[in-house]
Image (spheres, rainbow, N blue to C red):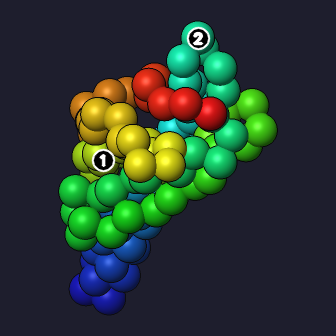
Amino acid sequence: MRKLLAASCLAVFLLVSAGAMMAQTRALKVLEGKVLGNGEAPLASAIVYLQSSKDNSIRSFIATDDGSYRFGQISPDIDYQVWSQYKNTKSGAKTVSSFDSRKTIVIDFHIKADK
């Protein structure tokens, strides 16, 4: 009886551990791209916003000198809205879907704005 109970406990432990390990191995996503202005000119210091559909929290990134931005460690199980702003001009919002299986998602923004 004790052996059966011990074997049952071990089996339950292994099943729970395997499920937890599988959940941890699901890779996080990366979102990156560029913010470009008139004539494909990079818009340094443009702000890119990333809003989670889970809790509406917003992360932001200031574009580098070449207009690029990067958000790492994005959950694959959550949808996001992403948009950019340069001075007083905003781009349209784009969706990063939890159904998109790519590990690296590239979204470029084009804003008609004077430098």
The residue type indicated by label 1 comes to: Tyr
Q: Residue lying furthest right in this view?
A: 65
Which residue matches tag 1?
Answer: 80
Question: In the rendered view of the protein, which quadrant contains the C terminus?
Answer: top right
Residue at image location 39% in from the left, 41% down from the top: 89
Q: Is residue 57 visible?
A: yes
In the image, residue 100 sits, relative to residue 84, either above or below, namely above
In the image, residue 21 sits, relative to residue 70, either above or below, namely below
Which residue matches tag 2?
Answer: 39
Q: CA distance from mark 2 to mark 1?
A: 28 Å
Question: In the rendered view of the protein, which quadrant contains the N terminus?
Answer: bottom left
Residue 106 at x, y percent in the picture = 51, 25
Residue 102 at x, y percent in the picture = 45, 25
Residue 30 at x, y percent in the picture = 54, 40
Residue at image location 29% in from the left, 34% down from the top: 92
Mark in the foreground, 2 or 1 = 2
Q: Is residue 107 visible?
A: no
- The mark nearer the N terminus, 2 or 1, is 2
Neighbourhood count class around disc 2 (C-alpha, 10 Å): few under 14, some 14–19, many 20 upward? few
